[in-house]
Amino acid sequence: ITGATMDVSSDGVQLFRMLSDSTGFYRIGLDVGRVWRIRFAAPGRVAKLVEFDLGDVPANDGGYGMNVDMRLFKEDAGKDFSFLDEPLGICRYDSATTMIKWDMDYTGPRMVRMPELVPEVYTIDTDSVSTGAQDE
């Protein structure tokens, strides 16, 4: 979504805000050694929060990347989205694989709720090209 905001915080303090560009693209660099939260929001849309636990990433490691396709759907007063006040997903460093991975024990049950609340909008894309579902 063009002009969506990303509020980036660590240790409960908002450190900066970013805006998506004219195509909805954004890029955020996060330092290792901290736990970060990013709140994605746009006017008239349901905000979502994601946590990146980079606290255990070795200090000399770096260069990790992750694509997060964040869909913000329209608000609906008839639906309870209060569970999104907490992170929708958490990703953490896995020392066994030396990768940053989604914690599916935490994230999985929350992701299951999304199509239940917004089935006509929230679909899993297999195509790498945006489908425009964010504008539904």
Image (tube, rainbow, N blue to C red):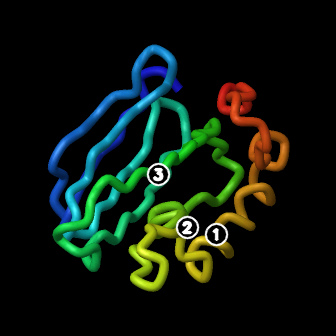
Q: Earlier in the sequence, mark 2 or mark 3?
A: 3
Q: Earlier in the sequence, mark 1 or mark 3?
A: 3
| Foreground pick, 60 / 48 | 60
Indicate the secondary structure of the residue bearing disc 2.
Answer: helix
From this view, report whether residue 6 is shown above or below residue 106.
above
Q: Point out which mark residue 49 bears.
A: none
Relative placement, left or right, of 27 versus 15 is right
Local packing at callout 2 (Cα closer than 10 Å; few below 14, some 14-19, many 20+) is few
On screen, residue 1 versus residue 73, left or right, reads: left
Measure how far apart labels 2 and 3 are at the Cα level.
Answer: 24 Å
Quadrant, the C terminus: top right
Along the line of sight, the residue nearer the viewer: 68 or 59:
59
**Label 1's element?**
helix
Q: Nearer the viewer, residue 27 or 79?
A: 27
Residue holding disc 3: 66
Q: Is residue 66 left or right of residue 113?
A: left
Callout 2 touching callout 3 (CB < 8 Å)? no
Q: Earlier in the sequence, mark 1 or mark 2?
A: 2
Task: State the image coordinates of residue 42 (x, y, percent, origin top left).
Answer: 46, 33
Q: Position of residue 46 (x, y in %)?
A: 55, 44
Q: Secondary structure at mark 3?
A: loop
Q: Which mark is residue 110?
A: 1
Q: Is residue 136 visible?
A: no
- Please say if 114 is above or below 100: above
Q: Position of residue 4 (x, y in %)?
A: 43, 30
Q: Is residue 105 above or below residue 49?
A: below
Number of residue marks: 3
Quadrant of the rendered image containing residue 20: top left
The residue furthest top is 22
Residue that mark 2 sits on: 83
What type is the residue that disc 3 sits on?
Met
